Amino acid sequence: MAQKYEMKQMEQAKPNPFENALEQLRIAAEYLKLDDGIHQMLASPKRQLTVSLPVKMDNGETRVFTGYRVQYNDARGPFKGGIRYHPGVTLDEVKALSAWMTWKTSVANIPYGGAKGGIICDPKHMSMGEQERMTRRYAAAIAPIIGPYKDIPAPDVYTNAQTMAWILDTYSTLEGFMSPAVITGKPISLGGSLGRDKATGRGAVFTTVAAAKVNKVDLKKATFAVQGYGNAGSNYAEILQTYGPKLMGASDSKGSITSKTPIDANKLLAHKEKTGSVVGFPGSQKVSDKELLQSDVDILSPAALENSILPDTAKGIRAKIITECANGPTTPEADKILHKNGVFVVPDILANSGGVIVSYLEWVQNLERISWTEVEVNDMLEKKITSAFHDVHAASQKHGVDMRTGAMIVGVGRVADAVKTLGVFP
Ligand code: NAD
């Protein structure tokens, strides 16, 4: 009983992600000298939908899952944001992620607002049939508020191109015509974009390359580690190693590893696909999550979930550059410590914006009925994200602040301008 109570206390000690998001907004609002009304509007999601999803399980029982769609702000364009399947999903987490999406599309300077969705579930313990029925019921439940010009969902943790195909089919069936632009991250055969699957990792690499240049880190001699070897993390590792840095450690939900000799990122992914984890990769040692994050590397990429870099871990981080592939991996307190210690953090809303940038390119191709080659898509991604990096870097230099505050100044500033110019209805 006492142990259970302690665990509850530990869970509660984890910061509320929406409070983190509001604290980041408060800091940006101060620099931007936003008036109170605009600050309040930017601190409040425009719409929050909670849905109950009855699903027939394979054993014949019916289970009711809870799902959310939070539409944070659409002043700059239709709502945009992924859908997460995870047992730890909460409304506050979805609200935080939808706020970050709003600043992210603004930093990337693409004509979208921000949204996010999620279902409290454990897809690892559900069959494909159960996942499909749950996804279709969720798509039907949120159908009235999504659409190519309203809100365009995409994948996030534990959802993928197949999940997007089920949502597309359900939405289109209800509408009565095929509507590919309602969702991005689709399979190529259904109007998905070449390059979308690797876009988040590739975009994060472009920001790391830019960060290395401004910090005079020689990528040819650099080393790196990745926490969370999933879609974003493994693609980041595979692409970054082609620029020279050597992968020295990685982790997933089953554990963390480091190695004294460089790890081939492609072989590590093959090992994870075969065995279900990065743990046990030949020549590696199993270490704790903290040891991985504090290992002696030049570049560190948290690419799992939020709140993974807490103050205690931050104190011992030795990397010169942190590229946040994950959303919200660093708590505000940990952030202060990293800044004080001179660690250059490429913040989530900039570092992982490659996914939404290529989602935007996918949506444009669907609406225009055109298709671009992978090289064209990657080139447009590089130009957009590198220009976003320099906008943020210029803002951080101008105000004498870290890159996260710089990104918030750029992102929040553009949304605030749009909100102000639209005025208040009625
Ligand atoms: P994913 O499901 O493909 O990968 C997540 C990985 O994290 C898995 O390997 C999982 O085992 C690992 N993980 C889970 N809990 C962990 C823990 N406690 N310690 C270490 N590893 C753990 O998801 P993804 O799409 O790669 O998303 C990862 C992060 O990147 C999320 O924060 C997501 O919001 C963000 N992100 C993803 C995209 C995208 O396009 N995929 C875009 C923007 C942001």
Image (tube, grey):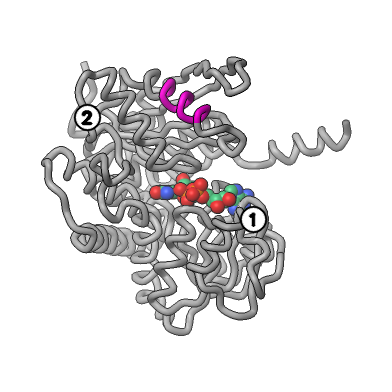
Instruction: Name the residue rendered at 62%, 35% in the picture.
Output: 125
The residue that appears at 61% across and 53% down in the rendered structure is 276
Q: Which residue is mark 1?
A: 311
The segment highlighted magenta reads 129-138
Residue type at the position of mark 1:
Pro
Q: Is residue 51 left or right of residue 383?
A: right
Q: Position of residue 351 (x, y in %)?
A: 39, 57
- Asked if 162 appears above or below 408 in the picture, the reply is above
Residue 179's disc is: 2
Identify whether 344 is placed above or below 53.
below
Image coordinates of residue 225 in percent, x first then y, are 55, 68
For this rendering, which residue is in front, 353 or 213?
Answer: 353
Q: Secondary structure at mark 1?
A: helix
Query: Taking 292 as reference, is 94 above or below it?
Result: above
Where residue 349 sits: x, y (%)? Answer: 39, 50
Classify 71 as above or below 3: above
